[in-house]
Amino acid sequence: MPNRITTFCLACLGLLCCSVSADVTFQYYRFVPLQLRDNGVSMIQLADFTFYSEDGPLEETPLVTNPGGNNPDNERPANLTDFDSGTKWLDFNRQALIFHFPAPVTIDHFGFTTANDAASRDPVRWILEGSLNGETWTLLDDRSGSSEIYSTDRYASYEWNLNQVSDTPSSTLTLSTATISSPNALNIATGTTTTIHWTTGDATTVVLSSQNETLANSLNGSLSVSPTTTTSYTLSASSEAGTTIRTVTLYVNETELNPMINEFLSDPSSDKGLLDEDGEPSDWIEIYNPNPFALSLNGFSLTDDPSLSSIWPFPTEAIIQPEEHLLVFASSKNRSISGEEWHTSFKLAKEGEYLALIESGNLVLQDFAPYPPMFENASYGARLPSEGLGFDHFTTPTPRAQNDSPPEPPVHW
Ligand SMILES: [Ca+2]
Ligand SMILES: [Ca+2]
Ligand SMILES: [Ca+2]
């Protein structure tokens, strides 16, 4: 039996809404077919039926039942969850499917794959419901009046949004001073004026609070605060669809650790690894912020010049968020526009050369004088603290992410 799967771009077809996803969590899902492609047919079939979270298909396998159904021996409901379009479920009676998961699962859409032969047996109108107990059902997707007819292609996969589920409120929460802002956390000296800004969308109730004290209830706004000790602020935006919560922390007089060069790569190959916005392989440098609060990189520079006379400064608006791994391409393309990809004015020599992170006034915060020879597509980076201090070669580079464990050095290194 053929096992070809065609997946359609549903954003193009308008079937799957690609805006903010609306999650629901249930232990039972019930698919009730209401009409097949050929309205005179009572025999339904599908090859696969899949539930998706934001991260992709769910890994949990539900128990699938088809109460009142009449299935041929080798075309049982369990064939729907084997991720094999060559096996199918067929029901002569066009009854509902119930998917019973071992525990509640969160989904934001679902999909199915059509089976072999008769396209007349494809469902074109249905409802999908969710339940926590298998008895009380909530309508999630209602295609009872649908006139959308999809392709008659066989073994084609379709994904469907939940058209009865409202999006939970959107919201933003930001801390800012005159020089820096962050949606996560800032560190201030006592007395620094700090402003909390917030916006919400689709919310009916908004509470900005700190230490169980309500500070504001407006949908959007800003508020100046001046705590004397480290304080967290929480924005809770609610509607009938649910509640969205965001939290920011204002650290006061915390010790700041310097940002650091955490990893770099100097010998990229064109057939694998990271490409820049021009689609070209490039050297790169990863900067890490070890603090739980954002830092400004205004005044910081990178250089490969041991005399420090030729440097590449970060944009004045540059901010590195808490524990962020920020990437700068070392391409010599010299680009430093805020909000765009950053490229130093120099490249990194693979035989090893000088590299430094410097602060204003040519204060060298960290340097390699020089770094050792590099290997193709291997990076050089800081070991994880659990693996001891110092730098090592990594055969699996991790741009914009925590460094991997370094491999045992091969004999030829
Ligand atoms: Ca199957
Ligand atoms: Ca160089
Ligand atoms: Ca990394």
Image (spheres, helix red, strand yellow):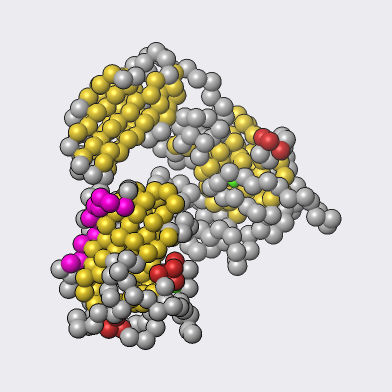
Q: Is residue 366 left or right of residue 164?
A: right
- Residue located 20% across and 66% down the image: 143
Tell me which corner region of the image, top left, top right, bottom left or bottom right, holds residue 170. top left
Q: Is residue 16 above or below residue 299?
A: below
- Residue located 32% across and 35% down the image: 245
Observer-nearest of 188 and 407: 407
Q: Is residue 190 above or below residue 149?
A: above
Residue 119 position in % (x across, y down): 31, 83
The residue segment tinted magenta is 134-144
Residue 224 position in % (x across, y down): 28, 21
Magenta stretch containing residue 141, yes or no?
yes
Q: Is residue 116 left or right of residue 237?
A: right
Magenta stretch containing residue 80, yes or no?
no
Observer-nearest of 348 and 90: 90
Residue 364 position in % (x across, y down): 63, 31
**Does the image show residue 47?**
no
